Image (cartoon, grey):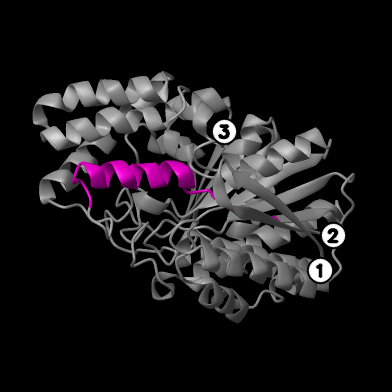
């Protein structure tokens, strides 16, 4: 199909409808029913599109619920395929319209168009769960924080001093993570640096909290303490000998802010590493999509960029073709590994990651204000069209 024919099949109303239907806290502890309703929704829609649907169920330790990855495909298990992945769980207090219903909606619309137009090619659509945090660790965190008076029964900080402590601790801890030392050692080092500044209850809390985590590096904990659903899927896929050509991962796509200095650029990243299209990086306008592509699939990234620049789509973007190993990328900037693509990269599977840069731009990230009215559906629609056009072109060549 020609580019104009395929992109005309994308319906922005469908994107809006999916986000509207999914919006709401989808959390393993506080909103398990909503989490399961979202899984049911993907199951239903993928079947409506005529795809083969498979659920991967798994447990977490002695935590009672069963968690569900939902996969829709148009091919046999043994056939090499391209996988598209987005998580559908949220943090405890956020309705998750952008994080990550915006990505779920984009994947559903791509799945619908590919299936309805009977596009050649082998595709899998994975809606993964437990990307945000390990539910047992979160429960123990709450128990300890309440025991020491850091948070109340509604999970709010009991004083401004504790809120400041948390923010300061997180900032220093994140700087230390690139060292490759164990999670426990990094927490101990951070605690030692701040010991003279922290209230005594906060010191006691952190002294106990650090041992909730396995004694592994922060990078090794990806897939164990967060990114859990996709880790389970990749682990199973490798054990079954599934052949994955590449993974396309989507996480937070819809925040557009056309104001100067609305876009933060982490100090560890040079602006010169990006290939830019219609991006005002000097004034730091937050109105583009960030794309990270493994070097092995740079040809796909180049195709994608061509479609983004076409008159029919015209999607502003910052593109980074990654030549680093996962370990080097982690030291370079941990934020570049903050979603499900990391589990594919760790398994040696090339990946392309799409995001609006979440907390580097979005003041509503992981808050109750992550609602549908904040999403720029034109932006999501443009990316949907660019990815769809790329997938079709790969199979035509």
Q: Circle 2 sits in a helix, a strand or a loop, which is it? A: loop
Q: Is residue 179 left or right of residue 51?
A: left
Question: Residue at left 57%, top 33%?
Answer: 322
Please tell me whether mark 3 or mark 2 is closer to you in this view.
Answer: 2
Q: CA distance from mark 1 to mark 3?
A: 31 Å
Query: In the displayed structure, would residue 52 be above or below residue 180?
Result: below
The span picked out in magenta is 126-151
**Residue identifier under label 3:** 322
**Is residue 127 within the magenta segment?**
yes
Discs 1, 2 touching: Cβ within 8 Å: yes
- Few, some or many C-alpha atoms within 10 Å of disc 2 (few <14, some 14-19, many ≥20)? many
Nearest the viewer among 354 and 57 is 57
- Few, some or many C-alpha atoms within 10 Å of disc 3 (few <14, some 14-19, many ≥20)? some
Q: CA distance from mark 3 to mark 2?
A: 30 Å
Question: Residue at left 26%, top 36%?
Answer: 171
**Residue identifier under label 1:** 115
Q: Is residue 178 left or right of residue 377?
A: left
Locate the N terminus and report the quarter of the image it occupies. Answer: bottom right
Question: Residue at left 49%, top 28%?
Answer: 219
Q: Circle 3 sits in a helix, a strand or a loop, which is it? A: strand
Residue 106 at what x, y percent from top left? 61, 65
Mark 1 or mark 3: which comes first in sequence? Answer: 1
Query: In the displayed structure, would residue 350 be above or below residue 99?
Result: above
Mark 3 or mark 2: which comes first in sequence? Answer: 2
């Amino acid at each position: 199909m020609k580019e104009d024919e395929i992109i005309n099949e994308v319906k922005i109303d469908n994107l809006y409808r999916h986000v509207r239907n999914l919006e709401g806290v989808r959390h393993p502890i506080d909103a398990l029913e909503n989490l399961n309703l979202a899984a049911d929704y993907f199951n239903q829609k993928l079947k409506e599109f005529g795809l083969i649907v498979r659920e991967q169920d798994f447990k977490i330790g002695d935590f009672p619920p069963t968690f569900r990855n939902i996969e829709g495909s148009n091919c046999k298990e043994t056939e090499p395929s391209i996988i598209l992945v987005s998580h559908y769980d949220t943090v405890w207090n956020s309705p998750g319209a952008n994080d990550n219903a915006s990505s779920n909606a984009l994947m559903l619309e791509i799945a619908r168009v590919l299936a309805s137009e009977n596009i050649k090619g082998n595709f899998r659509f994975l809606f993964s769960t437990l990307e945000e945090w390990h539910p047992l660790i979160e429960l123990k965190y709450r128990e300890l924080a309440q025991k020491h008076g850091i948070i109340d029964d509604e999970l709010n900080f009991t004083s401004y001093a504790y809120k400041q402590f948390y923010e300061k601790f997180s900032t220093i801890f994140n700087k230390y993570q690139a060292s490759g030392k164990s999670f426990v050692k990094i927490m101990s080092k951070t605690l030692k640096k701040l010991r003279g500044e922290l209230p005594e209850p906060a010191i006691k809390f952190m002294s106990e909290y650090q041992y909730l985590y396995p004694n592994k590096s922060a990078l090794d904990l990806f897939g164990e303490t967060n990114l859990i659903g996709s880790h389970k899927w990749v682990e199973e896929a490798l054990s079954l000998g599934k052949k994955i050509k590449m993974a396309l991962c989507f996480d937070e796509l819809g925040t557009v802010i056309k104001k100067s200095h609305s876009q933060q650029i982490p100090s560890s990243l040079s602006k010169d590493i990006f290939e830019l299209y219609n991006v005002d990086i000097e004034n730091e306008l937050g109105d583009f999509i960030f794309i990270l592509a493994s070097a092995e699939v740079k040809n796909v990234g180049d195709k994608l960029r061509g479609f983004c620049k076409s008159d029919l789509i015209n999607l502003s973007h910052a593109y980074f073709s990654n030549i680093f190993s996962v370990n080097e990328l982690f030291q370079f900037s941990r934020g570049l590994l903050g979603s499900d693509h990391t589990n594919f990269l760790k398994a040696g599977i090339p990946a392309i990651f799409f995001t609006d840069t979440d907390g580097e731009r979005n003041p509503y990230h992981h808050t109750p204000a992550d609602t549908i009215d904040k999403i720029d559906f034109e932006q999501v629609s443009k990316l949907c069209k660019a990815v769809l056009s790329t997938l079709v072109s790969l199979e035509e060549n």
